[in-house]
Image (cartoon, rainbow, N blue to C red):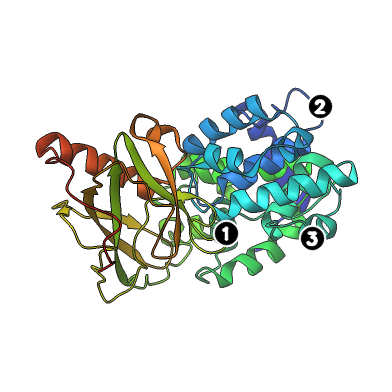
Amino acid sequence: MQVETEPLAARLLAWYDGHARVLPWRVPPAAQVPADPYRVWLAEVMLQQTTVSAAATYFEAFTRRWPTVAALAGAADDEVMAAWAGLGYYARARNLLATARRVAARGGFPQTVGELRRLPGVGPYTAAAVAAIAFGIPAAVVDTNVMRVVARLSGDPTPPPALRGRAEAWLRPHVPWLRPGDFAQALMDLGATICTPKRPACIACPLAGRCVARARGQAGDLPARRRARPRPLRRGMAWWIEAGDEVALTRRAPRGLLGGLLALPGTDWAETPCRRLPFAGEWEHCPTPVRHGFTHFALELEVALTRLAGGARPRQLCGQELIWVPRQEIGDAGLPTLYARAVEVVTCWQAAAPFAEPAVDPSRKEA
């Protein structure tokens, strides 16, 4: 099926001019002013594995607090990680800071896809999006929405992830030299609002007459779905330790899942359950584990509770440095979602079954 490059772009851009979504990081098509590369990059990082509605809330908070890349570069690591808490995929936040500092040091963002790719955490999609939207580079920008649109336009039955490269190759000659950023965002909006995963609204699509999948009656069947692999289940235990009006937290190792974030101390996570307690004493166990899904596994985290006697506050436990936080401030500590849920579980459990008087002496030998 032969498609004229310019008419496709022109028709899509005409639709976009009247139907563009209003998003906090987006310059409206009628404004005809360049987009701020900082806002484009920040939004694209936040949108990775995150819904638009969730990203918008964080984006507005971040840009109020750190309105420029230089402001973000000068922020303390702990402040940024706390502000990111709840958004998930915390390696993004670490890369965010690393990139902000590198960009601030060089005096601004690089303006080519290749140079952008060399920034921490910037992959092919993000580099192409920043280049096209902020700098007007005619790059093929392929996210999940765009990949779906292209699969249907071209009739390509290849399932992801192999589809991504094929979609980019198909799209590249269709990217216009004028308004490539609006073209990219138009495809994103088309996929998000009309060419949706289920029941696409083909009757409202500006490209319906050029869609191979629609002509074949396959619009709802493409892209082909890859069979999902079952995620393994891992289990672990978190220790809720109170002393007076404070609760013990720890900071996770800087690398790996939830790296560098505050958390409850506890065991490792493994497929073989580990119910080890750090010391002998009177422990209570919340009857309901905290369940959380990571990309490659599901987690069940049991929470065990105890209260220390005598006001003692150990500084280390099972090799984990402890940080004592007032109970009333734990909600503002920037805990990731997993441990924020653990706090909710403990709060509900304690309301139903309050602790007895303190009875545990942390100086006793670890179990």
Spatial separation of the CA atoms under disc 1 and disc 2: 40 Å
For numbered disc 1, what is the local secondary structure? loop
Q: Nearer the viewer, residue 109 or 321?
A: 321
Q: Of the residues shown, which amino acid type is indicated by label 2?
A: Val
Q: Which residue is mark 1?
A: 254
Q: Quadrant of the C terminus?
A: bottom left
Q: Is residue 345 visible?
A: yes
Per the image, label 2 sits on a secondary structure element best described as loop
Taking the spot 77% from the left edge, 56% from the top edge, the residue there is 119
Asked if residue 354 lies left or right of residue 308, the reply is: left
Q: Amino acid at mark 3?
A: Arg
Q: CA distance from mark 3 to mark 2?
A: 27 Å
Is 20 situated above or below 181? Answer: above
Please give left or right for residue 257 compared with residue 163 in the image.
left
Residue indicated by mark 3: 118
Number of the label disc, if any, that sits on residue 138: none
Where residue 333 sits in the image (x, y, percent)?
A: 45, 37
- Which one is nearer the viewer's eye here, 260 or 57? 260
**Relative depth, front residue between 258 and 161:** 258
Q: Position of residue 210 (x, y in %)?
A: 61, 52
Q: Residues within 10 Å of mark 3 (few under 14, many from 20)?
A: few
Point out which mark residue 33 bears.
Answer: 2
55 vs 251, nearest the viewer:
251
Mark found first going from the N terminus, 3 or 2: 2
Can you give x and y, in whole percent of width and height, for residue 94 in the image? 63, 52
Residue 28 in the image: state x and y as whole percent. Answer: 69, 26
